[in-house]
Image (cartoon, rainbow, N blue to C red):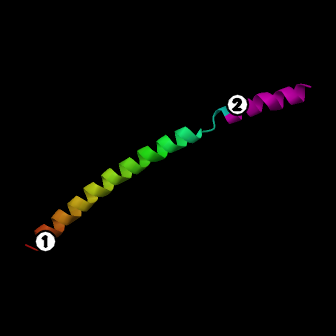
Amino acid sequence: MKRILLITITSIFIFSGCATWEGVKEDSSKAWSATKKGSKHVYEGTKEAIHEATE
């Protein structure tokens, strides 16, 4: 009986920390947004550097 109770309590602690689908979608949305912003910044910087180098 104690063993079943211990397994149940352990399972509750383990599974309570799992991400939900909504949380996963929100996190991936934030990551994609940051990637787009970073990529745009790098693209603009590269474009400007090439323009200055070819003047």
Range covered by the magenta-colored residues:
1-15
Question: Answer yes or no: do the residues labelled 1 and 2 have beta carbons within 8 Å?
Answer: no
Can you tell which mark lies on residue 21?
none
User: Residue 36 location in percent, x, y?
Assistant: 34, 53
In this orientation, which residue lies closer to the viewer: 31 or 54? Answer: 31
Looking at numbered disc 2 in the image, what kind of residue is underneath it? Answer: Phe
Q: Which residue is mark 2?
A: 13
Horizontal relation, residue 23 to residue 13: left or right: left
Residue at image point 75% right, 33% down: 11
Q: Secondary structure at mark 2?
A: helix
8 in the magenta segment: yes
Residue at image point 89% right, 25% down: 2
Residue at image point 92% right, 25% down: 1
Horizontal relation, residue 28 to residue 11: left or right: left
Q: Quadrant of the C terminus?
A: bottom left
Q: Is residue 47 above or below residue 18?
A: below
Q: Residues within 10 Å of mark 2 (few under 14, many from 20)?
A: few
Q: Which residue is mark 1?
A: 53
Q: Secondary structure at mark 1?
A: helix
Alpha-carbon distance for marks 1 and 2?
58 Å
Q: Is residue 8 above or below residue 28?
A: above
Looking at marks 1 and 2 on the same chain, the residue that comes earlier in the sequence is marked by: 2
Looking at numbered disc 1 in the image, what kind of residue is underneath it? Answer: Ala
Q: Residues within 10 Å of mark 1 (few under 14, many from 20)?
A: few
Residue at image point 48% right, 41% down: 26
User: Residue 20 location in percent, x, y?
Assistant: 59, 38
